[in-house]
Image (cartoon, rainbow, N blue to C red):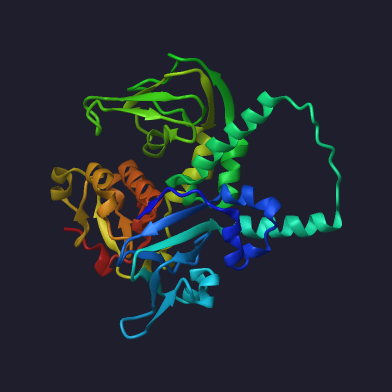
Amino acid sequence: MSSNTIINKELFDRFIPLSQIPLSSRDEVIKHTMITSFDVCRNIVKYSDRSKLYHYLIDGYAEIRYSFDNRTNISCEEEKSSHPLEEYIKHGGIVRAITPCRVLIINRDYIKDSIEESEHLEYNVVHIENDIDSDEESTIDDNYKSDWMTLFYQSPLAANLSSNKVQQVLKNLIHVEVVGGQKIIECHTAGDYFYIIKEGYAEVITDHAGPFKGAKFTLEPGDYFGDEALVADTIRNASVVMSTDGLIGKLTSDDFSNIIKSALVITPSVDEFMDLDHPIFYDVRFPFEYKLNHISDSLNLPISKIRHNIHTIDRDKTYVITHEGGSRSELASYLMRQAGIEAYYMDEELFKSLPPDSEKLQVG
């Protein structure tokens, strides 16, 4: 699966209800839209009552599979491809690519908001005089700001947050001007903020003893950092230094926990847990800890392996991260959710509330 395509706003005319969005409003909606390619046999979308996205088939053939014996195909040339693929799996199922496919993915909340706004404007027409002598530099700044926001909206993090959550993130950002050479975070210090690069570039210098072995990375507008230390409540494993002058947005640890962490580190209720369909249990502790005691049938997959092999984890399955890892388990759930994997965190309270005779919870 890959994505890197400029979106033509006239493409919306092919799809329902995107065609109802006025041309004048489509540039804004495109900021919350992406086109993604799926290889043969890759899952495009599966049923979820929590999804905030719509998937539209632009090119290719796909299979709508309800069960082994109940399946049908859909072509991009058919009239039914004008509807979001979610319409065909309302009660369960998976849509899988039969040929290489291109798919338009959009946050459905922005569709509704744009249509409602355009309908409102039809009854409340306001004439705005254009300032012919407007400052050209101001226009450049506006375009630049939209660039970082577009990139952030297309990030794995924003893609797995509701539109309301994304707006809360942007609303609560504290904006700080920075200069080249300024150290934003110091390795081996406690986490304090979540950061987004708005303008300028920064360099990440990782700890030689950490998971990235001293590697260096460049951060660009729209990139974010500082989240993992806040999720796991650990010290930083890297320093971040501005390479140029710029502007950053930062979110306090409390706001991060309330807005972002709460959305991606999800602990189900007892009833919800018991209704999970054959979940796979991951114990993310070190092997020597796992050997001492663990939930029967749980698999030992330390957090470092999850981080480096997350692209190989089957997205068609459901996962429960066991409680023994504590904050490491929370981080594993966060990383997996951010990668589009249905993962749940079993905290200590949930573990103690579950029936002790449950086959899922036998400790060995």
Quarter of the image for residue 208 reads: top left
> Which residue is painted at 74% across and 55% down in the image?
117
* Foreground pick, 222 / 235: 222
* Foreground pick, 21 / 234: 21
* Position in image of residue 197 (x %, y %): 49, 30
Quarter of the image for residue 101 reads: bottom left
* Position in image of residue 24 (x %, y %): 70, 51
> Which residue is painted at 40% across and 39% down in the image?
231
Task: Tell me if I can see residue 258 in this picture.
Answer: no
Quarter of the image for residue 116 reads: bottom right
* Foreground pick, 41 / 214: 41
> Quadrant of the image for the C terminus?
bottom left
* Position in image of residue 29 (x %, y %): 61, 51
> Which residue is painted at 19% across and 62% down in the image?
297
* Position in image of residue 38 (x %, y %): 36, 60
Say left or right for 292 vs 87: left
Say left or right for 16 vs 355: right
> Quadrant of the image for the N terminus?
bottom left
Residue furthest to the bottom in view is 69
